Image (spheres, rainbow, N blue to C red):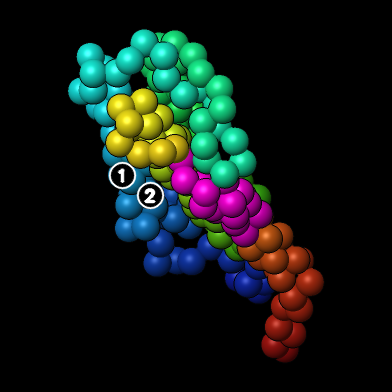
Amino acid sequence: MDERRLEDPKMRIPDNSSEAEFFLPRRSTLDWVLEGVSLIALLTAFAVVAILWRELPRTIPKHYGLFGRPNGWGDKSSLWKTARDAAGLWAVLTIIVVPLGFARRSAARARPIPAYVPELLRLARGHLLTVKTVMMLFLAYLVWATVYTSLGRVPGLGPAFVPAAVVAISLAVIGPMIRILWVSVRYRYSTPPARSR
């Protein structure tokens, strides 16, 4: 065995965990909660359109102004396009996450794995799950608000929609990226303990 595995904490693989668990930690409860919320939001968008389809007028809001008031109109079939686009985005982000679960290396044959790699992979997975969940929630709300605006039950998206969307999506994208960068820098410049003689 390479001596660096034993001497350098940055290159050490814990003896009490499997190679798979070390290289990519199992999904946390939060990961599964985010997966569930994103899927429920997506299904809700489809369900709202399907259940209220016959009640909808032929022309519905298709574009909204800065304060959430409709200022553009189009055919109600655009609702299905929005829902399909949401499903496509959900599928793409889900597919991107899946390969991370197959990140495996043999401890017997591979070179030492830096200890920060599992943490970076875990953060990357959490980053994608967070972005997916936030996007699905806002797209589901967009579909719901469009349907209920068309039926005259709400006046539009609401004045808080645009700033809330900008803030939430920005935090979902930028926040995890800063954390990933911090972990990389911390491990890059941390000083390993001196070797005992």
The residue drawn where x is 41% and y is 38% is: 155
Image quadrant containing the N terminus: bottom right
How many marks overall?
Answer: 2
Classified by dominant secondary structure, the portion drawn in magenta counts as helix
The residue drawn where x is 74% and y is 85% is: 194
In the image, the segment drawn in magenta is 157-175
Q: Is residue 164 magenta?
A: yes
The residue drawn where x is 64% and y is 63% is: 179
Residue placed most toward the observer, 47 or 38: 47
Q: Amino acid at mark 2?
A: Leu
Label 2 near label 1: C-beta < 8 Å?
Answer: yes
88 in relation to 133, above or below = above
Residue placed most toward the observer, 180 or 160: 160
List the single residue furthest toward the right. Answer: 189
Residue 14 appears anywhere in the view = yes
List the single residue furthest toward the bottom. Answer: 197
Hey, which quadrant is residue 113 in on the image?
bottom right
92 in relation to 29, above or below = above
The spot of residue 124 in percent (x, y) is 57, 49
Reading the image, the residue beneath label 2 is 34
Q: Which mark is residue 36?
A: 1
Q: Secondary structure at mark 2?
A: helix
The spot of residue 101 in percent (x, y) is 45, 41
Locate residue 178 relative to residue 142 in the image: left or right.
right
